[in-house]
Image (tube, rainbow, N blue to C red):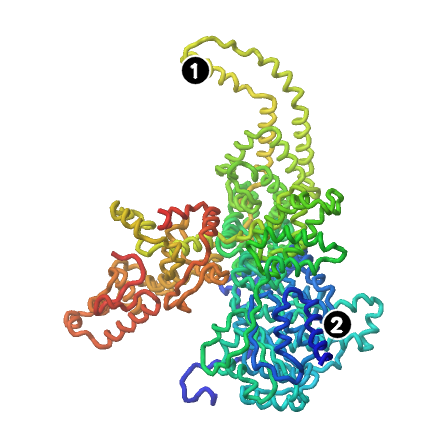
Amino acid sequence: MAAMEIEEENPVKNISKKISCRNQQIKTLVSLIGQREQVAPPTLFLYGHTGTGKSLVINSLLQTRELPHVMVNCVECYNQRFMYEKILNKLQGLRSYMNDPDSYLKCDNMNDFIRMFRQVCEDRGLTKQTVYIVLDKAECLRDKEINILPAFLRLQELTHQNVCVVLMTEIVWEKFRTGTGYCEPYILNFPDYTKDEVLTILTEDRPEGCEADFYSMYLNLLLSVFHMVCRDLREIRYLASLNYDQYCQPIKTGDVLASDTRKLWKNIEPHLKKALQTVYLREVSSSQWEKAQQETEIGETPSLQGLSSRNHVELPYYSKYLLIAAYLASYNPAKTDRRFFARNSGKVDRRAKLIKKHERTSNHMLGPKQFPIDRLMAIFFSIVEGKVSPTANIFVQISSLVSLNMLGQVAGDDQIDTPKYKCLVSLEFIKSVSRTVGFDVLRYLYDFV
Amino acid sequence: METGSSVSKGVFAYKGKKKSVNPEKYFPKSETVNTWKRRLETYQSLWESVDTEIQILQSDLNTKIFDDLLKFTKTCHSRFTLSSQTGDSRTKEIPTAALVTGVNTPDHGVMFATLVTLLQERVSPLVAILQSKDCNNVKNTLSKLLGQILKNPQLFEDDEDSPEVNQKNLPISLATLADWYDDKYTLNHSSPKKRKSEEGDLVDIQILPPVIMVFEDLESFQPRVLQEFITICSNYLSQLPIVFVFGIATSVSAVHRLLPNAVSSTLCMEKFQAPPSTEYLTLLINQILMTKHCPFKLGSRVFKLLLDIFLYHDFSVLNFIKGLQFSMMDHFLSNPMSQLCCPLEELPNQTKRMNSDELELIRQLPSFMRYVESCSLERQAELLTDDAETKIEVLKLVTEIHTYREEFYPILRCLHTLVSKLPKQPLGKQLREVYATVLGWNMEENEDYQISLDLLKFMSKDELIGLLRGCGSCLGNDLPSSLKDIPVSINSLLDRFDTLHEQVEEDEEETTDSPVIQKTDLHSLKKRLQELEKKKKKLSPYEKLRTECVDYFDSLFRKYLVSPKALPLHELLYYDSASTVRSHLTASPRAAVQLALGSSHTYLRNQTESDNSGTISPDIPDVCIVYKLHMECSQLINLYDWLQAFITVKTSNDEENDDQVKNPDQVLQARFIRAVSELQFLGFVKPTKRKTDHVARLTWGGC
C-alpha cells in the first residue's frame, strides 16, 4: 500500500517540479488516470486559452509514465480517413509509411476504425492497459462528419476496450453540443495564469548566467507595461526575450549597477513603450529589432520599415484613381453620384439637407457597400485628370487590385454579367493615396460634406 | 476521324503538325528590295546582346536583397538537429522571411524563379514554391508541397540506391514529409558513401538543409487555408526545419489581415524589401537605352508611350522590356533599310552590300531629302544619281549619328544635373523625363528649357557651385575626345567662383555712397526708389560670372543636344511610330467594338459605304444597322419602333416599301431579333421589366 502511494505521489511531484503553477490540474489528472490497468473515464475534456499549459501537462504526464497513447492534431486531418489511419498506425508503432508500406493500415470509416482498433489493441497486447487518444484542437471535429464526435465520446462503450479519449480545445463544452448522442465527458478547466504565475513561469526560462532576482525585476517592469494589453504567455515570452538585451545594455557598458533598478527602468521604458505599438505583430525578428534600437540611439531616423511605414504601398497612377473611385463608390450612396460628379449638380434643398444630416448614419460605420463595375468606371472617368481611353490596361488594373486584396469581388465571375466589387481599404489609406495624386477625397465623400 | 463524328456535334481540336516558322513570310511582300535576311540577322544579334545585358542588370539589382535572404534562410535553423526532439519544451516559432516585392505582379514570376534556383543552389535542395491558384484547400497545398520536395531530382543525384518514392500511395501529410526527412538525413550520415565525400569538413554534416516554402502571392491565398497550413507546420517544427518565404505585394500588414494572432504568433518574421520597380526601370533606361552601345534607339513618342504605360498602368519592367522588344521588331520589320541599324564596326560592310534599289529608298527618306536640299547644286546631282557617292555619304552620315550619340549622353547627364533640382522642375526630375523631352524637342521653341535657364540665372553662389561640381563628376572619365575640354572649363569656372570674393570687396567700396535718408513725402520716395532700382541694374561680379556660366552651358547644350529628329537618316536608327506600338500594346476592346459597329467598312474594307454620311445604308450588316438605330434612342427602346425603323432601312432601296412596313417579312423580323440579341451579348442593351416590349440601353449618349 505504501509502495503504491509513493508511486502515485512521485509523478505528481516530478511533473509539478517541471511545470509550475498547474498543481491542481496535474493532481486531478493523475488521480483520474490512476494505475495502468484501471479503467479511466471514457472522455476527458480539457479547455482553456492558448498558452495555459494543456498540451504540456498531458504530454508530460503520458510520456513520463510511458502510457500507451496517440496524439493527433485535428487541424491536420482534412478528412476522417486520414485521422483514423493516423491513430491506428501510430498505435501499432509504425514509424513511417515508407519503412513498411505493407503493414500500413487503411481505414476510411468509423465502423472499420472501431473494428481495427480492437484488432490492433489485441495485437499489441494493450487490452488490459488504458490507451489514450489525445485529440488536440478538438473544435475542428465539429465541422467534420456528424458521427465523428459522438463516436469518439463513446469510444470506450463501442470498442469494449479500456480507452480514454482526451479532447483539448480553447472553447467551452457547451459549444460542442450541436447534435445528439453525446456522452458527457469529464470537464477540466485550465484557467489563465495570474500575473504572479506568469512571473514565476517566465523567471524559469531566464537566460543562463542570470540571477533570478535580477531577471524577475526585469519581468516585473516588462509586465507593468504589457500586462494591460496582452496576457498571452507566448507573446509575453517573446517580448521578454526581445527586450532583454536592451535592458542589460547599460550594465554591460558599465554605466549602471545591476542593483540600480530606477536607472535601468529609465533606460528601458521608452523602448518598451515603442514595442507596445507593435505587440502581437511580430513583424521584426529580434536581430532586426536590435539593429533598429541601436540606430535610434545613435540619433539616426529609424530605418526600420516594419515600424515606420507599415502601410505604405506604391501604386501606378491610374490604379490610385481606380482605388479612390472604388472607395467613393463603396461609401457614397449611389443617388448622390449626380451631385458629386455631374457638371451642374442639383442643389440640395437646405432644409432637406438639415433633416438628412440628423437622420443619416455614417456610411463609414456601416462598412463598404458593393457597386457594379459600370459605376466604378463612371466615377473613375469623372475624377481622373486628362482624357483616358478605356483600354484593356485599365481593366487589368482592377483585377490586379483584387489580387492585392484592395478590392474584393462580390458577384459575377465574368464580364458579361457585370461584376460587383467592394473597396477593402481604410479611410486613412485612401487619404494617403489621394494625397499623392493631389486629390481631395474628403470633398467627395458624402459623410464628410 | 471516327472520334469527330460522334453523337454530339461539337468542335474538336486536333493537334496538328507543328509548323516551322518561315521568317520570310512575315516581312511585307510589297517591298521593292530584298533585305529581309540581313535585317533579321541584325535584329537577332542586337536583341540578343540587349537581352543579355538586361539579364545581367536584373541579377545585379537583386543581388543584395537575395544575399540577405539567403543568409537568413541559412542561419535561422543552424542549431537544428534531428536528435534533439526531447527537452526543449518551449514552443518555437517558424522563421519567416517577408519579402515585400511591390505591386508590379507581372515581374514577380521571374524574380521568384531566380530566388528559387538560388535557394536550391546555395541553401537547400528542399524548396517548394506555392502559388495561390494551386492551393484552394489544405490537401492540395500539402500535395503540392510534397510533390515538389519529394520529387526533387537533386536529391537522388548522389545516392541512386535510395528507394524511389511512389508518391501516389503516400498519405498526404506533413508527417510523411517528416518521416522521409528523418530517413533521408539520418541514413545519409551513416552511409559510407556520403561520409567519404564530406570527411573534410565535419562541421557541415551537422547542418541539415532547411525545408523552404515560398508563398509567391500571399495576398491571394485563402485565409483559412493559410491559417491551417501554418498551424500544421508549426506542429512539425521540432521534426522539420521549416522556413517560410512570404511574397507580399503590398505591405507587411497584409499578413495580419490574413492571419489571426493565434497563427501569426507562431511566426517570427523578418522583413526584406525588394528594390522598387521604378529603380529598376531607371537603371534599365540609364544602362541600356541611354548608351552608345546599342545602335537602335526609341524615338521620343514611343519612349514617352512606354514610360506612360509603365507609370500609369502597371509598374511592370517586364512589360516595358516587352514593349522595347516589340518596337525593335517592328522597326526591323517595317523599315526596309533598317539593316543599317547595326553596330558601328559592321556599318562599312552593310553599306557596301547595298544595291541601287536600296539606295533609291534611302534617297526617298524625308530627312535625307532635306539634307540633300541643303547641299550645293553639284553635290545634289551627285547624291541623287551617283550610287558610289551616295554610299559614301550614307556611311558618313550614319557614322555621324553614332558620334553624335557619344557626345549626346554625357551632355544630357550634365543638363539633368543642372535642372533636376530647380524649383518645380520645368524639365522634369528624373533623367528619363529630361531624355524624353530632349529626344523630341526643338530647342529654340522649348519654353521649359528657357524657364530652366532663367531659373539657373537666379541661383545663389553655393547652389551653383554645387551644381557645377555635380556636372563635373557626372561627366565621368571616358569622354570622347571632342568633349575632353569640358571638365577643364568647368573647373576653371569653379576656380573663378572661388576667387570671386576678393574682387567683390573692391567693388563694394565703390558703391557705398548710399543716399542720406531725408524726410520726404511718399511720392518723392517712390521716385527715388525707382531711380535706385535703375541704378542697381549694374551687375555684381558674381552675377556677371553666373550669366557667363549659364551662357556657356547654354552654348554647350545648343551644340550637342540637338534633337535626333533633325539629323539626316535618323529614320534608320530611331523608331518613332507610336501609333503602331499603341495599337499593339494597349488594347481597347470597347473602342474596337464601337468602331466595328459604327463604321463597319474599316473592317470589311468596303470603301463605298464610307462616304454616305447621315443616312444608314441597307447594305451593311444587320447588327450595324441595329446599333446605329439604337444610338438615336433614349434610355428605353421600344422594340416595335426599332423593328419598324430596321425594316425601313432595309427596304429603302425597294420600290413599294409601304406594303413591306405594314406586313413585315418574317425573315426580316428574325434577322432583326438576331441582331438585337447580338447587341445584347455585346453589352449594349438588356431586357428590362420597367416597360413591356422595351429594352434598356446600357451605354451613355443619345438624346
Q: In front: A118, or B263?
A: A118
Q: Are marks 1 and 2 in contact (CB under 8 Å)?
A: no
**Residue plotted at (53% across, 70% down):** B225
* Outermost front residue: A1
Query: Does B606 appear above or below A122?
Result: above
Q: Residues within 10 Å of mark 1 (few under 14, many from 20)?
A: few
Looking at the rendered structure, whether the residues under marks 1 and 2 are on a common chain is answered as yes
Q: Position of residue A134 (x, y in %)?
A: 60, 77
Q: CA distance from mark 1 to mark 2?
A: 95 Å
Q: Amino acid at mark 1?
A: Lys
Res B576 visible: no
Residue closer to the observer: A87 or B349: A87
Q: Nearer the viewer, residue A224 or A407?
A: A224
Chain of the residue on which disc 1 is drawn = B
Numbered label attached to residue B526: 1
Q: Amino acid at mark 2?
A: Ser
Q: Is residue A332 above or below residue B7?
A: above
Which label sits on residue B83? 2
Quadrant of the image occupied by residue A122: bottom right
Q: Name the foreground residue: B17 vs B6.
A: B6
Which quarter shows the C terminus of chain B? bottom left
User: Mark 1 falls on what kind of element?
Assistant: helix
